[in-house]
Amino acid sequence: MTKETSRVAIWNWSIVTRAIVDSFTKLNPRTMMKNPVMFVVEVGSVLTTIALVRDIAFGRPGIGFELQITFWLWLTVLFANFAEAMAEGRGKAQADTLRKARTETVANRLGPGGQVQPGGQGAHSWHPFSYNPDTGLVYFSAIETSTAVKTATNFVARPMSANVGLEFPMPPTIYDELKSKAPRVAESRLVAWDPVHQREVWRTGVLGNIGGGTLSTAGGLVFQGTNKGRFVAYDARNGKELWSIEAQTGVVAAPSSFELGGEQYIAEEVGYGLAPYGISNQSRLLVFKLGGAAKLPPAPPQPPKPVLNPPPSTASAETIEAGHQQFASHCAMCHETAYANRAVFPDLRYSPALNSAEAFNAIVLEGALQTAGMASFKGRMTVDEVQSVRAYVIERANQAKSAPPTAGR
Ligand code: HEC
């Protein structure tokens, strides 16, 4: 919706005329009592009016002053009512416009597919930026991403499902099909921006695929971590890298600085919630100072690579296709590992539960892993539907197992 459709002109004539009428109907003492100040002014107006009428009736001389007071008091009350009625009228008109926009807004089908830039991750995301009054620059991570999508060929809307009408899983050839030149993998950089002259002053090369919070100090430094596991200090004026450390884990939080006993410390919480599922985080608070000598203990060995071990795929093509549809509606938004940032959810192709219909049902329908974030789909899916998803995932696991070694993760 554009701004135009939600805006209501200040002097909309129908609102003004309605407000004039309302300023009189609002004189009803029961309405006025809701605003004690104006109610007192109204009572005052009534009293001076009574006094004025009495003086006119008795033909007293010198009523000019009384006339003026009465006039101004009524004007005050009426104007207050008018202003209130205008505000109410405009609010109502705005609500009407929004309501109309809600029923009249059109969604366009993208045709066979399309591309969104920046992608779902956004061009910056939540990572805090910093401002350095000495350089006059703002330091933030900028992410270049895109999302290319293909419209589902046989989409059926279902209650309580994602209903995005997109192909799941997205074919890997989608960018080529769309002849897209957009970045296929998210790329994050640290950017120094001059907000007064609205221009970029420097930027780093690609640091990772998600940004990190920044801190800029009076010492002329900018600190930022990368999701690839480095914590780096740059020269705030020109972006030259001056120092870095391997943090043994992704670093995305914003650093902070404090002074203790006359010494400056830089503190950084390291650890990365989006590390691939099954890979542990080395979550720690790392604190640095000039001349500090502490060393990190050696990094623990990487956990063994998960192994694809599905049972043979024996289900019919129809069952597998039905499972594909159910997976797209109910599971893909979390478990489709091809999507950015979905790595925290298990890749179901590797799940031992594929080997047992009972185990799969216990997780999906009985909520066996509910406390770990895998809600029960009881009442939303039948046992047959759940088992069709299992058949579909088994099929995909077998495909991945027989694919060249680069497939899977
Ligand atoms: C809102 C996100 C979400 C959705 C939607 C979702 N899951 Fe899960 N699922 C999770 C999480 C989180 C876990 C990991 C639980 C844990 O850490 O043990 C999980 C775990 C699982 C596991 C166990 C995996 C393993 O490690 O062996 C299975 C099986 C599973 N889900 C099946 C499904 C199926 C089938 C659907 C669709 C019907 C589905 N899930 C939909 C979040 C989701």
Image (cartoon, rainbow, N blue to C red):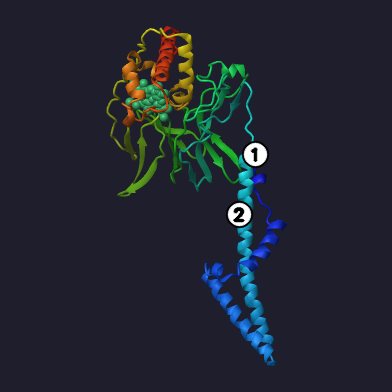
What residue sits right under mark 1 in the picture?
A: 104
Q: Position of residue 381 (x, y in %)?
A: 42, 24
- Residue flagged by tag 2: what amino acid is it? Gly
Q: Is residue 58 above or below residue 164?
A: below
At horizontal 63% and vertical 55% (from top left) the residue drawn is 90
Q: Which element type, helix, strand or loop, lies under badge 1?
A: helix
**With respect to residue 259, does 341 lie above or below?**
above
- The answer to whether residue 345 is seen in the rendering is no
Give the amino acid type for the residue marked by disc 1 in the picture: Glu
Instruction: Give the vertical position of 77 relative to 168 (above or below).
Output: below
Is the CB of mark 2 within 8 Å of ligand 1? no
Q: Which mark is residue 178?
A: none
Quadrant for residue 78, please give it: bottom right
User: Residue 136: x and y, percent?
Assistant: 53, 46
Q: Nearer the viewer, mark 1 or mark 2?
A: 1
Q: Quadrant of ligand 1?
A: top left
Residue carrying label 2: 91
